[in-house]
Amino acid sequence: MIDIIKKHIADFSASNWNDYKAACAPDMVYEELATNTRVQSADEYLKAVQKWKRAFPDAKGNITRATASGDQVVVEVLWEGTQSGPLEGPMGAIPPTNKRVRVNAVIVNTIKNGKISESRHFFDMLSLLTQMGVAPMAGTGAQQPGKGDGQPSQRRP
C-alpha cells in the first residue's frame, strides 16, 4: 500500500495527472486542514492540488518516512518548490514571489480496493507564507526585517 502513495506523490511531482487521478476512488474525500479545504470527489481533489502546482510549477514531494497499518498509510513528505505562479486562496491570489520554499507535511491516507479513498494533509501554512515573504516571521514578537517601528520589542516573561 505504501507503493500506491509513493507513486501518487511521484505523479504529482511529474504533473502526471491521469495516473494521479487514477489512484483515487471516484468518491474519495480530501482534507487540507491548513487551508480549510474539503472536497468529496477525485475530480475536485485534482482541481485542489493542481492549484498548488500552478503556484509552484517545480514542486516536488519527497517521502521521508512511511508506515502502513490496516487500510491506513501515513507518510511524512518534504515539499519543495518555487512560487513562480499566483497562489489562489480564500482571500484572493498571492502574486508570484519567486521564493523557494520547503515545507514538511504529514498525509494520512485510507486505501480501499487499491484506491485512495481518503486523504488528510497536514502542513504548516504559516511557515509556507513566511518563506514566501508574505507573512510575519514565526516566533514571539518577531517581525520581518524593515517592517518594525525601529524600537526594541518589549518581551514579557
Image: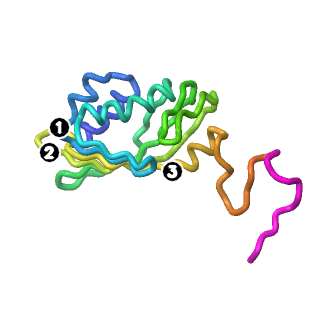
Crowding near the residue tagged with mark 2, few <14, some 14–19, many ≥20 C-alpha atoms within 10 Å: some
Quadrant holding the N terminus: top left
Furthest toward the left, the residue is 113
Asked where in the image residue 116 lies, by quadrant, the reply is: top left
For mark 2, what is the residue? Answer: 112
| 25, 6: nearer the viewer | 25
The answer to whether residue 111 is above or below residue 19 is below
Q: Earlier in the sequence, mark 3 or mark 2?
A: 2
Q: Are marks 1 and 2 in contact (CB under 8 Å)?
A: yes
Work out whether 52 lies above or below 14.
Answer: below
Q: Residues within 10 Å of mark 3 (few under 14, many from 20)?
A: some
- The reply to whether the C-beta atoms of the residues labelled 3 and 2 are less than 8 Å apart is no
Going by the numbered disc 1, the residue's amino acid type is Ala
Q: Is residue 75 visible?
A: no
- Residue type at numbered disc 3: Asp
Q: Where 63 falls versus 12 (above or below)?
A: below
Distance between mark 1 and mark 2 Cα atoms: 8 Å
User: Disc 3 marks which residue?
Assistant: 124
The mark that comes first in sequence, 3 or 1, is 1
The location of residue 77, given as percent across then percent down, is 42, 43
Q: Secondary structure at mark 3?
A: loop
3D distance between C-alphas at marks 3 and 2: 28 Å
Q: Position of residue 112 (x, y in %)?
A: 14, 45
**Residue range of the region highlighted in magenta in the rendering:** 146-157
The residue where tag 1 is placed is: 25
Q: Give me the residue at 43% from left, 37% from top.
A: 62
Counting from the top left corner in percent of width and height, residue 50 is at 39, 29
SS for callout 2:
strand
Q: Is residue 156 magenta?
A: yes
**Relative to 136, 155 lies left or right:** right
Q: How is the image coloured?
A: rainbow
